Image: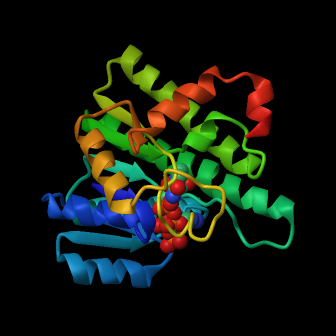
Amino acid sequence: MIIIGATSGIGAALARQAYSKGYIVGGTGRRIDRLKQLREDLGEDFYFREMDVVQQEKAIEQLHSLIEEMGGMDIIVINSGIANYPASSVTSMEQEIIDVNVSGFVRIFGEAFQYFRKQGHGHIVGVSSIAGLFGAARNAPYSASKAFISTYMQGYRNRCYHSKYDITITDVKPGFVESEMTEGKKGMFWVAATNKAVHQMLIDIEKKKKISYITRRWRFIAWLIKLAPNWLIERI
Ligand SMILES: NC(=O)c1ccc[n+]([C@@H]2O[C@H](COP(=O)([O-])OP(=O)(O)OC[C@H]3O[C@@H](n4cnc5c(N)ncnc54)[C@H](OP(=O)(O)O)[C@@H]3O)[C@@H](O)[C@H]2O)c1
């Protein structure tokens, strides 16, 4: 299993849980010290590459060299994402979110898809968000980026169905989960412990679910959001 964005939060917890279940795990991220620490904590079946998904061509080279070192890839989890980014202007902050959450995602996804097509099978897991189900007043680019990747994955899942490709695509939609992304943020509820959310996520990956709500109770919120009238959505 290769995890793009394994240096903290959901990705790091997934690396640890998958490793302890016997997976050969590959992790990436920009913070190489965190990856080295994981290798030290886990062992030699944890492989890693420093990777910034914004530097797309380099990221693809690093992905292929990681696959080669691991002797293949059956599952890729594209977990990398940002919500807030320190930048001098709102516009550049929005661009950073699009660069990482949309452009970076699409480039890695496309490469993994081609790899699995040649291989004849594979499983792509993308981490979107409940925030992708509506336009969040406090973070429009973030929720739009997550809506994009959910619709994108749905389109590819439908393509696999029509083309009879043996490629599973799982859209993981977290609610609020403890991580560096949510640290110190106000206005959150039902904030799940990272390990609990990731435990459920791994079960759903193994079940090859199309959509995974972590934690499960967020399925109810998703359902409410889909039914809610516009006047109510405006007040969220
Ligand atoms: N926590 C929540 O409540 C929540 C809710 C809904 C969705 N999510 C989604 O869950 C995913 C994981 O987030 P998290 O909560 O675990 O936050 P986190 O602790 O901040 O983790 C984000 C991960 O993304 C990686 N990343 C960020 N920018 C990157 C870049 N340019 N290139 C490569 N990797 C990059 C980070 O690695 P480096 O910084 O080392 O590069 C890190 O491993 C994200 O996609 C997030 O949008 C989280």
The count of marks equals 0
Q: Quadrant of residue 144?
A: top right
Q: Residue furthest left?
A: 22
* Position of residue 41 measured from the top left corner of the image (x, y, whole percent): 23, 81
| Residue 209 in picture, x, y percent from top left | 32, 32
What x and y, as percent, mark residue 19? 20, 63
The quarter in which the C terminus is drawn is top right
Residue at 49% in and 66% down: 179
Q: How is the image coloured?
A: rainbow
Q: Is residue 222 left or right of residue 141?
A: left
Of 57 and 151, nearer the camera is 151
Residue at horizontal 69 percent and vertical 64 percent from the top: 84
Residue at position x 78%, y 46% in the image: 137
Q: Image point 51% across, 47% down: which residue?
A: 175
> Height in image: 121 above or below 126?
above
Q: Is residue 93 above or below residue 136?
A: below
- Can residue 64 be seen here? The reply is no
Answer left or right for 223 relative to 65.
right
Quarter placement of the N terminus: bottom left
In the displayed structure, would residue 73 be above or below residue 193? above
Depth check: 58 or 94 in front?
Answer: 94
Residue 180, position as x, y percentages in the image: 53, 70
Q: Could one spot residue 205 in this view of the protein?
A: yes
